[in-house]
Amino acid sequence: MRRDFVANVSHELRTPLASIKGFAETLREGAVDDKEHRIEFLRTIEEHADHLTKMVDDLLDLSAIESGHRLPRLEPEDLAVLLTESVRAFAPIAGDRGVALEALPLPLLPKALADRDQFRQILANLLDNAIKYTERGGRVEVSAEASAGGLSVAVRDTGAGIPADDLPRVFERFYRVDKARSREAGGTGLGLSIVKHLVEAHGGKVSVESRQPGGSVFRFTLRAA
């Protein structure tokens, strides 16, 4: 597992580093005087540097969660408030991509036992994923309901769906269903792994259902306060 992890990290770092080096060399060799293209080259370098920063941040986050250095501080939280806040934060991103984003009306629910910041991170990763892989004109919905022994939160999208063979592996580090599209969208391949570890640290479980075509539903459970 360690060998696989190191190999995956090395592979993921190699592409943006090669691009940064290549564009920097191009600028040094004369393109810095090319007024038409130099800003484009610099912007590309900046984008790859941002991607590397996000990947390192996610790796450090995952390491802290796995080692027990980020244990959740569980407190009674109102799911309606947390879901509404998250949807509001992602509304501009969804709007830019032409995707409708909505929090469905919730039934009367008990409060959830959750770490507010970690809950926001779980939902942010799921919403970011759903919006990225939903075509323009599609829809993403967030809902919650009572479940056996607690509460269940669902993020449903109308995207292309996930092949059945890929479903068991989507929560693995660096596993991507569509590698080219994921990199193009700026994904690090670590978001769903972080979701899984945070949900389990809360004492819950995360799962995914998907059909092609028909979209995907990611669900996670929390204990009731």
Image (tube, rainbow, N blue to C red):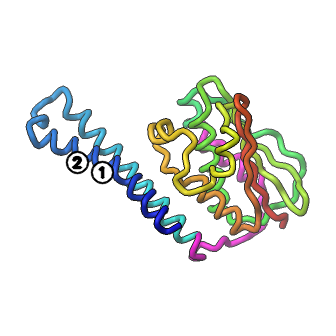
User: Residue at the location (77% across, 50% down)?
Assistant: 153
Alpha carbon of mark 1 to alpha carbon of mark 2: how far? 6 Å
**Where residue 71 sits: x, y (%)?**
64, 74
- Give percent across and percent down for residue 200: 71, 65
* Amino acid type at image mark 2: Lys
Q: Label 1: which residue?
A: 17
Q: Is 40 on the left or on the right of 145, as rendered?
A: left
Image: magenta residue range: 66-91
Q: Position of residue 76 (x, y in %)?
A: 78, 66
| Point 43% across, 63% down: residue | 6
Given contact means CB atoms under 8 Å apart, are the residues at marks 1 and 2 in contact? yes
Asked if the stretch drawn in magenta spans residue 32, the answer is no
Q: Quadrant of residue 79?
A: bottom right
Q: Secondary structure at mark 2?
A: helix
Query: In this rendering, would 12 be left or right of 195?
Result: left
Packing grade of label 2 (10 A; few <14, some 14-19, many >=20) is few
Numbered circle sitting on residue 203: none
Q: Residue at x 67, y 43 (%)?
A: 165
Callout 1, which amino acid?
A: Leu
Q: From the viewer's perspective, is residue 133 above or below residue 149?
A: above
Which residue is labeled 2 in the image? 21
